[in-house]
Amino acid sequence: MSRGRPAAGLCDSCRHQQLVPTTRGSVFSLCRRSRREPERFPRYPQLPVRACTGWERRQERG
Ligand code: SF4
């Protein structure tokens, strides 16, 4: 999960996280809840996220 990017805190276990690689080789942690509720959730929250009302556990595969 952590290929050269800072830990994103809660977002790393949240189903709303989307990892966005950049052309410069880094990876941003995007919050997909920001699409419907931009007033509540920033597109790119300041990391690491320690508390979030929108967090929902991501279903792990396997
Ligand atoms: S809902 Fe909260 S914990 Fe989940 S990705 Fe967005 S900011 Fe991170």
Image (cartoon, rainbow, N blue to C red):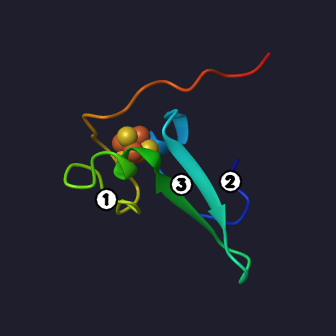
Q: In the rendered view, would you say 20 is above or below 53? A: below
* Residues at circles 3 and 2 in contact by the CB criterion of under 8 Å: yes
Q: What's the amino acid at mark 1?
A: Pro
* Residues at circles 1 and 3 in contact by the CB criterion of under 8 Å: no
On whether ligand 1 comes within 8 Å of the CB at mark 1, the answer is yes
Ligand 1 is found in which quarter of the picture?
top left
Q: Earlier in the sequence, mark 3 or mark 2?
A: 2
Q: Tell how many labels.
A: 3
Callout 3: helix, strand or loop? loop
| Residue name at image x 48 percent, y 39 percent | 16
How far from the left and from the top, in percent, is residue 13?
53, 34
Count residues near mark 1 (Cα–Cα under 10 Å), then give few for <14, some for 14-19, many for 20+.
some
| Left-right relation of 39 to 46 | left
Count residues near mark 2 (Cα–Cα under 10 Å), then give few for <14, some for 14-19, many for 20+.
few
Q: In the rendered view, would you say 19 is above or below 59? A: below
Locate residue 56: give its quadrant: top left
Q: Earlier in the sequence, mark 2 or mark 1?
A: 2
- Mark 2, residue position: 2
Count residues near mark 3 (Cα–Cα under 10 Å), then give few for <14, some for 14-19, many for 20+.
some
- Mark 3, residue position: 7
How far from the left and from the top, in percent, is residue 50?
32, 45
Is residue 45 something one can see in this rendering? yes
- Mark 1, residue position: 42
Q: What distance separates the C-alpha of mark 3 from that of mark 2?
A: 7 Å
Q: Which mark identifies residue 32?
A: none
Q: Residue furthest right?
A: 62
| Residue name at image x 62 percent, y 64 percent | 5
| Left-right relation of 60 to 16 | right
Q: Residue furthest bottom?
A: 24
Q: What's the amino acid at mark 3?
A: Ala
Q: What distance separates the C-alpha of mark 1 from that of mark 3?
A: 17 Å
Q: What distance separates the C-alpha of mark 2 from that of mark 1?
A: 21 Å
